Amino acid sequence: MSRRNYNAARIRQLIVIYVLIGLAIIGFLIFFLSKTMSKKESARNEGIEQFKNGKYEQAISNFQRSLAEEQWFSADMDLDTRMYLATSYLRLGKYRDAVDCYKKLQEDNNGTLNNELILSMQETAEAQAAISEGQSGVPSDETLERLTRLSADEPYLYLQLASAYNRKGDPAASKQALESYLAARPLNTYVALELSTAYLKDGKLTEAKDMIDKGLACDDNVYDDLLSYNDTVILEEQGDYEGAFRKMEELHERYPDNESITKEYTFLYTRVHPNETPVNPNNDALEDNSSY
């Protein structure tokens, strides 16, 4: 073979090699983009929007789809998605599913989330599961004594004890049980909600407000909407309907499909924007206000 023919053949071989390398690079890029630009994030974002509107069943479906979608570099996002999933289970009363989800979070946590907070939420779910699966009537003195004795070693039982005392009609002992839980575990939004509600029932508005603010500063955000609802109740109790309406207006914008929030928003709207012209002039004021 002449040198000229050899060079031509060599050039053709190099061209083929370069083409193959180029195709391999393109294939790798396509594979890489498929792993980094999947539907994972869009399913998660849709779930978060549904979660914010109290549509927990739909949110769970999207969170599960997001977690099932494989994607590189998504460990931190998956942890946060699983936290949303656990929260959705908790709000739906699917406590055992929530417990399993929190356990999985503890196993997979890479330091992104607060392990103590995850544990307290797991214990909250476990306590509520036990409460929902157990007796709902007035507990016996023996039951209360047993829970009190066991709570020292198993702090989550303080949450069951608080519920038991509420059923017995002893809110003071219920608050004490919740406060004992806080001595062993960090505050979460469930405990903050329970305590703030108890303080409100006792007319202790300052204590209730303090607990609400501390609860809203927690990282779990499970019961933020109900804590914010309690915040408006304080303003109502103080006769500040304007302030209560402004807070409820913000809450209604965040949770437009929440029926309880919508009902309270409508009520406060009538207080801040009274209808000066009766719908039915034949009705007196008492009849006009009877629906409140």
Image (spheres, grey):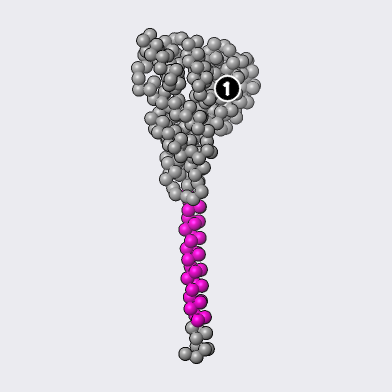
In depth, the one of 273 and 82 nearer the eye is 82
Is residue 258 left or right of 271 when viewed as pictured? left
Q: Where residue 52 sits: x, y (%)?
A: 52, 34
Instruction: Confirm whether the magenta stretch covers residue 21.
Output: yes
The residue that appears at 44% across and 29% down in the rendered structure is 122
Q: How many marks?
A: 1
Q: Where residue 258 sits: x, y (%)?
A: 50, 29
In the depicted structure, whether residue 72 falls above or below residue 81: below
In depth, the one of 200 and 241 nearer the eye is 200
Q: Where residue 54 sits: x, y (%)?
A: 48, 32
User: Magenta segment, principal secondary structure?
Assistant: helix
Instruction: Confirm whether the magenta stretch covers residue 237.
Output: no
Question: Can residue 56 be seen in this snapshot?
Answer: no
Crowding at dot 1, Cα within 10 Å, few <14 / some 14-19 / many 20+, comes out as many
**Location of mark 1 (residue):** 212
Question: Can residue 100 be seen in this snapshot?
Answer: yes
Q: Where residue 134 sits: x, y (%)?
A: 35, 20
Is residue 254 left or right of 161 when viewed as pictured? right
Instruction: Give the quarter of the image for residue 224.
Output: top right
Q: Which residues are magenta?
A: 10-39
In depth, the one of 185 and 167 nearer the eye is 185
Q: What kind of residue is marked 1?
A: Ile
